[in-house]
Image (cartoon, rainbow, N blue to C red):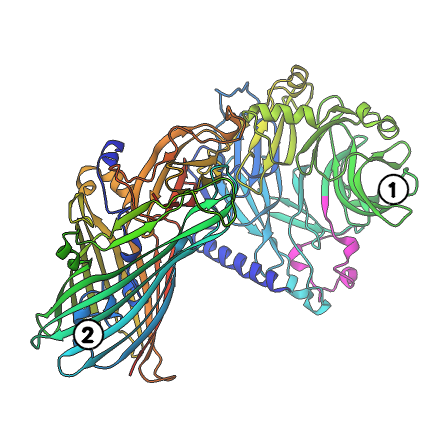
Amino acid sequence: MLGTGMACAQTGGEAGAYLRAPADAQATAMGGGQSAAPAYFSTWWNPAQLSLIDRRILSAGTGLYSQGRTEAFAALEFRIPPRVGIGIGALYRGDPFLDNLYNASEEKLDAGAFSTLTAKVALSYLITRRLSAGLSIGFYYQHIPTSYMGTRILYSDATAVGGFSLAAQYKITDSLTLAFAVRDISPLQLLTGAPAGIAMNWQVSASSEQDFGDDESGFGNPSITDLVLPEFVVASSYRGMLARYPFTWTCDINGYVVDGSFTRLQSMEAVLFTGLEWRRWQTFRLRAGIGDITFNRYLASDWQYYWQNFMFRITAGFGVDMNAIRKGLTLNYALTTDKVWAGVDQKLDIVYGF
Amino acid sequence: MTSDNVRRACLVALITACTYGTAFSEKLTSSEITSNNIYMLAGRGDTLWMATDQGLNYTIDTARPLDTTNALSWHGYNAPLFTRALGFGGGFAVACLDTEPFKKTGRLWYYSHAAESYSTLTLPFKPDSLDSLKRNDAVFMGVGITWIRGFFWIACVDGGLVRWNPAQQDMRAFYPNSGKSYDPAAVRLDSATTEFTVFPDSSRRVIAVSAGRVGADTVLFVCTPAVLYRFHPSDTSWESVSSYITEGGLSLETYHDVFSSERTRELYAGIAAKNVSGGRDTTLYRYDSVSGGWVTYPFLRNVRSLTFGPDSIVYLAITPNNIQAAAGSRPDTLVRTAAADTLICGPASFLSRISVAMNNNTPDSVSDVLYLPANDETDSTGRLWIGMYSSGVVNNGLFFSRDERKDERDKRHFIYIHRERKIQSGLKQTYAYPGILNGSYAKTIFAYSLSRKANVTIAVYDWNMNLVKVVTPHEPRPAGKDDPLGNGRSTDRERDVWDGTNSAGKRVAVGVYYFKITAEGGESSFGKIIVAK
């Protein structure tokens, strides 16, 4: 078991881990699969959907993951008839509770926080009645403790501009939609001969067990470059009737084939997210799903190792139409298990269509 | 009722409702004891019963030679209500269970060894008939039980002293200082009997009962808060025991418990007495039948249980983890001389013998002690049984000696019986140092401590909880107390180390990483590491 575990790589530890978790409460409640025909936050999920939305959508939400990880987002999306859709959105993710870190002398460090901000501007074009395409351009920012002096934490930042996400969406029938997306690549870098992954550049000071005050000279600033792992997505969405009431089924398969330098991964992975929304009541929707079902080589070669280390998540949630307060207002909530039994994740969104 | 009490009551009601939805009591198939939290012991001859927080257990053939390789086989029954008192006699075991939520009447759970079957019975009092008396605090449940003269005698608080034979299902109630007996179901306000016009009366609450002997007559010592009675079952007469306390400046205030022995004819009671300055002094007293007064044991406070051993020795369980043996045959000496003269075995001796049995772990809280002589007629040899409980997860169970007098003399450890715990590693003090990996520090060490040797797995995950690396895959680690460096760590400083790479040896990206240390039995702890190298 250990032998295979030590010999092969997975996606864990590749750059941009915080980008790979599902965003917003509706998608999270449905297993985390929402790339085909998302109801909102299409700027993140699938920019090709923006030219198909029928109204302006303002959305905002927050999430609390296990182990103190947090999330917040906001987005505005609208269509310019007849063929163009535009969206802007921003997503914060981080961990503000880095309060149990120690230095090499086992003295407790001051509390710290890990923060990221990802902003995207998206554009969509309706090519035919059934086919649309989309593109988003991103801004990526990370802020994290990277060294210490005594018990005082020192931070570093990394910024990247120009990460692209490309998407296409095809409506096979009135009920069934298929979508393809490539997320977080930097094709413009190819023009300079650099790898196509989004590059996050860090300058990291050395740590010291002694605090020299503001004098941080002489500690150097070694540079580190991380290339964000690209994500390839195939997704579908189906709308039908279940027990005489409407339902929506969604499924995303995220493939990880190459690393940020576009070198083939030793151990490729596919991760499946699927879920249902059932509109049994006029103003209330139930959602449930399964997320992070990982397909990798361990599934066939070492079932015990796979079961211990690649647990899926069970998700549930609901949406409530709050037209009584304001027409077009919806509240969404999601609750999910954690992959490592570290707790539960919760998300809460407000969506306003106008 | 405070909001906390309301919440607690709702929780208890919910749990009880769920439990009752399946079965009140169920025979367990495991030959192990039901729980390591043991609250009460009862037994006679070769049979031992005990009540745990999970139900009831019994084992027979306790009189045969036993050692660790010659273990007892246990029979177990779960019970959804807490056991208030446990008695054994006449081939029956009876457990007085707590009242159900929002009810005032307790249950009896009883087992017939002849029929090898159990049953339950709700005490047949009618507490609703007392509502007009505004006595909402009336309680009708068994809080003490003993067996003599073919009957169980149960201290039923506001229900008085109840006499019951499970074989005949004959139940009668006796109220202190009343020669009449009554059918418990008939005790109500509208009874023609004027005996109960002032009932329930706190002075008639029966809170403890114990069997003893006066001359050739077997009697019951029945305790109310204010009076200790001597009850003669033969003619159902009551006689109060003197409340005169020989210790100067003390006046008896409240009885708490009573302990007596048919074999040694001794009588002890837990009594709260008020001293001259108005303070309360709750301690153990011994009745001196010659002087007719009570003799105090000022150093024996918070006595939870008392059992009569050989040679006029009494063994005491003293809260929280103190077990003592005192010679009770010389009360005058006991009172007037130093404690060292009166204690045959102090706590150090008992706890040492227990600790060795537990591989040098420290026991938690003692709940009950019971001496079972090998022969009812001659008490020279016998086993001492000790029940332990714990509010935590460690160090409790059942202990017994092979022959207490000989074992005590030879300082032989007790034999330890406990149920294997699922969570037993006592994982704690988990963190990684340094918590930030960069050019200065290329590796981090996982610090943790186990209370006992266990297999450990350490895995690292990224922000999205994707596995990065299994650093330590289910490897044995020692207890922290065995750390050769004396730091109390179980860490293997060569192997419990992460260098900021994934399982293929590739450097991981700058970010926050989460580690999970899992100890044998499923106990786990999380921590965070930052990688910037």
Residue B236 left/right relative to B517: right
- Residue B15 seen in render: yes
Determine which residue is flagged by label 2: A50
**Quadrant, the C terminus of chain B:** top left
- Residue in the foreground of this view, choosing between B247 and B276: B276
- The residue positioned 69% from the left and 62% from the top of the image is B188
- Residue in the foreground of this view, choosing between A250 and B85: A250
Counting other residues with Cα less than 10 Å from the Cα at mark 1, is it few (<14), some (14-19), or many (20 or more)?
some
Dot 1 lies on which element? loop
**Quadrant, the N terminus of chain B:** bottom right
- The residue positioned 70% from the left and 69% from the top of the image is B132
Residue A282 left/right relative to B350: left
Determine which residue is flagged by label 1: B242
Which amino acid does the dot numbered 2 rest on? Leu
Q: From which residue to which does the magenta span run?
A: B179-208
State which quadrant residue B217 falls in: top right
> Where is residue B318 drawn, in percent x and y?
70, 36
Q: Are marks 1 and 2 in contact (CB under 8 Å)?
A: no
- Residue in the foreground of this view, choosing between B313 and B290: B313
Eye-nearest disc, 1 or 2: 2
Majority SS type along the magenta span:
loop
